[in-house]
Image: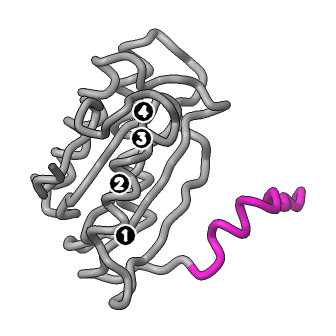
Amino acid sequence: MELVVPEKGKKELRKGRFSKKGGFYFITTCCYKKQKIFINNKNVQIFFNSLEWFVNKEFIDLYFCITMPDHVHIVFELVGDKTLSEVIKGLKQFAGRRIKKNLGLTNPIWQEQYYDHLIRRDESLFEIIKYCWYNPVRAGIVDNPEEYPYCKSKYDLK
């Protein structure tokens, strides 16, 4: 049996990860090899529809999501019986299969790992959402976050 040692970055991303039902999470997950998957409107809609499926199944309560060309940011409350890892793995598989079919790809859509942050009481949920909302401005894609169409929010951010 061969010993497989995880890459340093992957181990660091998993360090301290745990699931807390009722916890609010800020998730960032990137596309495989920085592919610009989300410059395609249909892929964005596939991802948003996949998220909606997880909301309808009552695994998460979605507060915010934005797709950037090569990654996504999601803020949600973990409300169902699935762990954080199960939710993210399921979401990436569910959306990934549909996006691969749409693009006719065989290679992966997502990097294996993701960044997660459990939002603590002393942090502002709205400040984290605002940080994500301004991501397209910082990236030079738009001048005003209101111009960026690939965003879903439970709040009126204007």
**Up/down of 146 relative to 101, above or below:** below
* Residue 93 position in % (x across, y down): 41, 41
Is disc 1 surrounded by few (<14), some (14 to 19) or many (20+) residues within 10 Å?
many
Which badge, 3 or 2, is on the more N-terminal residue?
Answer: 2
**Up/down of 28 relative to 72, above or below:** below
Q: What element carries label 1?
A: strand
Which badge, 2 or 1, is on the more N-terminal residue?
Answer: 1
| Mark seen at residue 3 | none
Distance in Å between CA atoms under marks 1 and 4: 21 Å
Q: Are marks 3 and 1 in contact (CB under 8 Å)?
A: no
* Residue 148 position in % (x across, y down): 29, 31
Q: Which residue, given by chain and number where applicable, does mark 2 sit on? A: 74
Q: Which residue, given by chain and number where applicable, does mark 4 sit on? A: 96
* Residue type for callout 1: Tyr
* Residue 69 position in % (x across, y down): 47, 28
Q: Is 86 displayed left or right of 13 in the figure? A: left
The nearer-to-camera label among 3 and 2 is 2
Q: Are marks 3 and 4 in contact (CB under 8 Å)?
A: yes
| Mark seen at residue 93 | 3
Q: Is 131 displayed left or right of 1 in the figure? A: left
| Residue at 25 percent of width and 54 percent of height | 64
Q: Do the residues labelled 2 and 1 touch (CB within 8 Å)?
A: yes
Region in magenta: 1-16
Q: Which residue, given by chain and number where applicable, does mark 1 sit on? A: 25
